[in-house]
Amino acid sequence: MSPEIYRPFVGLLGFNLLALLLVGLYYANRLLWPKPMAAPGKIYRCAKCNHVYVDPRDVPMARCPQCDHFNEAIRR
Ligand SMILES: [Zn+2]
């Protein structure tokens, strides 16, 4: 068989290898991208008025800014 018959397959193979290379580069660089930092403090949900708020201090209970009710942290 002549090499001319392989030409479309070589083109497809080259295209697929190039796509694989680009995907590999994308995921290799993704590990270096900075991750969004979590806001400091804990998240609270008021049991009285359902207001969700963040207190930057590391305290087990915080006062709701809307109704002054004390609530326990629901997350970190
Ligand atoms: Zn409240």
Image: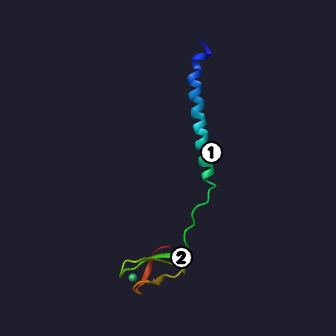
| Residue at the spot of label 1 | 25
Q: Residue at x 58, y 20 (%)?
A: 6
Point out the quarter of the image occupied by ligand 1: bottom left
Give me the residue at 62% from left, 45% from top: 25
Question: Among all residues in the image, which is located at the extreme bottom?
Answer: 68
Q: Residue at x 57, y 63 (%)?
A: 36
Disc sitting over residue 41 in the figure: 2
Residue pictured at 41% horizontal, 84% vertical: 66
Furthest-left residue in view?
A: 48
Q: Where is the N terminus found, in terms of image quarters?
A: top right
Picture quadrant of residue 3: top right
Q: Callout 2: helix, strand or loop?
A: loop
Q: CA distance from mark 1 to mark 2?
A: 36 Å
Crowd around label 1: few <14 · some 14–19 · many ≥20 (10 Å) = few
| Residue 42: percent from left, percent from top | 50, 76
Residue 59 in the image, given as x and y percentages of width and height: 52, 82
With respect to residue 4, does 48 lie above or below?
below
Mark 1: amino acid:
Leu
